Amino acid sequence: MDTNSPDTATATLLSVQNLTMRFGGLTAIDDLSLDVPAGSITGIIGPNGAGKTTLFNCLTGFYKPTTGSLRLDHPTHGEMRLEALPSHRVARDAQVVRTFQNIRLFPKMTVLENLIVAQHNVLQRASRFSIAGLFSLPGYRQAEKEAIERAATWLQRLRLEHLADHAAGELPYGIQRRIEIARALCVDPVLLCLDEPAAGLNPRESAELNALLLYLCRELGIAILLIEHDMSVVMNVSDHIGVISYGRKIAEGTPEQVKNDPQVIKAYLGEDDEDAENSGNAVTEGAAA
Ligand SMILES: Nc1ncnc2c1ncn2[C@@H]1O[C@H](COP(=O)(O)OP(=O)(O)OP(=O)(O)O)[C@@H](O)[C@H]1O
């Protein structure tokens, strides 16, 4: 990553301040404040319907928050207010990129083509919105060459290069999830937002995902914001975890602090003693894997 440097490790990259998102009478996010440090992995957990994906949708411009601010300290552009940017500029200019809960690859395109399409912003600019692209002028050809090289680099880093010419939709589910991450990485993210990347993975694939996330963060310096229900992933890779319930932050801290927090156990287990016993398991399950 060109835009991240190791000395930013303790700085705040993203500051979510007093974020509220209402849908009519439903408050999905309720006065949420949370800091995402640079160069680290921040986990976001919480029961179903807690507001985690809504937070991502606010961050990436899919929703305009009702109130509150999302300040990104961009390594080259300085402070950017994400809540004021349209979604295409969040990815293109702020380099905040996301994956989705449901896989959204182009199934009939090859793996390589999926990664090139992700770079449409750069290619579109180089094409001068079609004339240069149409006549394949040198500037466009150069941009196209760089896009292919960038895609090839990420395929190689994620050990997918042997699958470059396969149709994405024909590959196993766990591989498709990995391709989605590779595709997001082609945009050179300052902040990579992953929405349940372990959903549907088997234990071996979850362990590989852990290794991948640690590599991206520790070796390449990419900050990651991770929504995940799979505790064997989130508890093992996160430096810091925020817990949301009914749109509010109920706890924040290291994985160890969070999994022992009575409010977190209650949110997962409910009030009932027996439920609570089960919910404690839900928070800690797989954490030592
Ligand atoms: N576009 C929308 N219109 C109305 N309600 C919405 C919309 N998007 C989300 N919600 C509601 O906001 C609440 C939070 O949903 P959200 O998807 O953010 O939860 P989540 O924590 O991601 O849940 P899960 O873990 O099940 O994916 C839910 O009650 C959901 O029904």
Image (spheres, grey):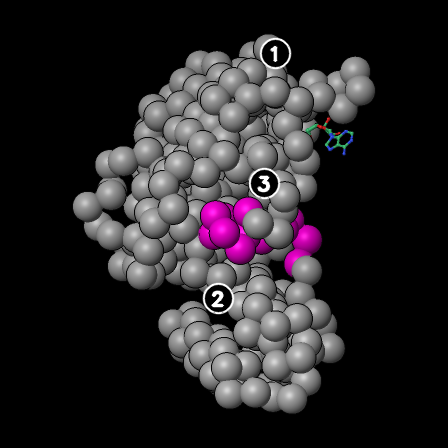
- Residue 76 relative to residue 134: left or right: left
Residue 49: within the magenta? Answer: no
For discs 3 and 2, the disc positioned in front in the rendered view: 3
Q: Nearer the viewer, residue 269 or 1?
A: 1
Tell me which residue sits at (68%, 29%) in the image.
49
Residue with the mark numbered 3: 85
The CA distance from mark 3 to mark 2 is: 21 Å
Q: Position of residue 105 (x, y in %)?
A: 67, 66
Q: Quadrant of the N terminus?
A: bottom left
> In this orientation, does residue 88 appear?
yes
> In this orientation, does residue 161 appear?
no
Q: Secondary structure at mark 1?
A: loop
Counting residues from the N terminus, which is met first, the one under dot 1 or under dot 3? 3
Q: What amino acid is at disc 3?
A: Leu
Q: Nearer the viewer, residue 283 or 31?
A: 31
The CA distance from mark 1 to mark 2 is: 47 Å
Q: Position of residue 237 (x, y in %)?
A: 36, 45
> Image quadrant of ligand 1?
top right
Counting residues from the N terminus, which is met first, the one under dot 1 or under dot 2? 2
Q: What amino acid is at disc 2?
A: Cys
Mark identifier at residue 107: none
The CA distance from mark 1 to mark 3 is: 44 Å
The magenta-colored residue range is 90-103
- Residue 257 relative to residue 31: left or right: left
Counting residues from the N terminus, which is met first, the one under dot 3 or under dot 2? 3
Residue with the mark numbered 2: 186
Residue with the mark numbered 1: 272
Residue 100: within the magenta? Answer: yes
